[in-house]
Amino acid sequence: MSPRKIIIDTDPGQDDAVAILLALASPGDIEVLGITAVAGNVPLHLTEKNARIVCELAGKPDTRVFAGCSAPMLQPLVTAEHVHGKTGLDGPQLDDPTMPLESQHAVDFIIETLRNEPSGTVTLCPLGPLTNIAMAFRKAPDIVERVQEIVLMGGAYFEVGNITPAAEFNIYVDPEAASVVFSCGRPITVMPLDVTHKALTTRARIDRFRAMGTKVGDMVAAWTDFFERFDMEKYGSEGAPLHDPCVIAYLIAPQLFTGRNINVEIETTSPLTRGMTVADWWGVTNKPVNAHFIGDLDAEGFYDLLVERIGQL
């Protein structure tokens, strides 16, 4: 079976970095057609830079990286330096990248790729706010039906919000974009906080990365050491959730995850719950199903996969 073709849309972020590493370490399963950067965890000039830093760390400087939207569709950008640090990849820092940033805008790359690849063969993997994806769908509606699947990290139901009491960060940053994507009619698989909060780092799990004895393993351990300090203090948990690698792990080993096919709508108007993913987990509305909403995972199997693949870089 040929590798699954994907575009990673991302706002790195330490957990985004681990997701990119997992994808680039899995060429037998995944073909990364390109990485599109969006403003989110930090502003765009840092997310596109961080994406290239990660590609070079992985030894994949030929990966194409594109800069996309620098602000949400309607509202000012909200960032998360309080979680990821001022660079987005705080912790031990790597040198600035030498690989070039592609000149084409990320939105145009998404459109061009979906038009040029056979219909139904490209999966979109958003790891941050959905601005680039929504803008591509708005600019070129003909591409929507050509998307194989959208597998994204965002939202929550039982875990509610992590940036407001009701909203998860990626959706909150650009709920209008999220509304466009969730109403697009293509298959959507969602990795909400409900599942990512079960993918916790622990001392033993971080030590497995450090024990690789490689530059990549050391960086993953250092990034997770930095990243987890915020969540451990906030939630009183034993580690931090590795949110974004769940998207890539699902493409490689979907048997690690369980969820339900439900209706999900995005709140865009209420000042109290703006950005909330209203997930009809119990099927009380009888509204049409539009998302496969993941609720659980095999955490040990997830970390086994991360260690096996990242250990090959």
Image (cartoon, rainbow, N blue to C red):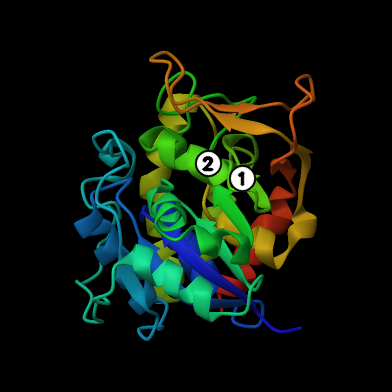
Quadrant of residue 89 in the image? bottom left
Of residues 135 and 301, the one nearer the viewer is 135
Q: Dot 2 corresponds to which residue?
A: 154
Q: Residue visible at 55% across and 70% down?
A: 6
Give the residue type that dot 1 points to.
Met
Q: Residue visible at 63% across and 72% down?
A: 308
Residue 129 image point, x, y percent: 41, 45
Quadrant of residue 158 in the image? top right
Q: Dot 1 corresponds to which residue?
A: 191
Mark 2 Cα-neighbour bin, 10 Å: few <14, some 14–19, many ≥20? many
Classify residue 56 as left or right of residue 177.
left
Q: Residue visible at 62% across and 61% down?
A: 145
Of residues 12 and 262, the one nearer the viewer is 262
Classify residue 211 as left or right of residue 94.
right
Mark 1 Cα-neighbour bin, 10 Å: few <14, some 14–19, many ≥20? many
Answer whether labels 2 and 1 touch (C-beta < 8 Å). yes
- Mark 2 or mark 1, earlier in chain: 2
Residue 107 image point, x, y percent: 36, 63
Quadrant of residue 150 in the image? bottom right
Task: State the mark number for residue 20.
Answer: none
Task: Describe the element under mark 1 as helix, strand or loop.
Answer: strand
Residue 262 image point, x, y percent: 74, 35
Residue ranking furthest to the top: 272
Residue 197 image point, x, y percent: 59, 37
Q: Can residue 83 be seen in this snapshot?
A: yes
**CA distance for labels 2 and 1:** 6 Å
Give the residue type that dot 2 points to.
Gly
For the N terminus, the quadrant is bottom right
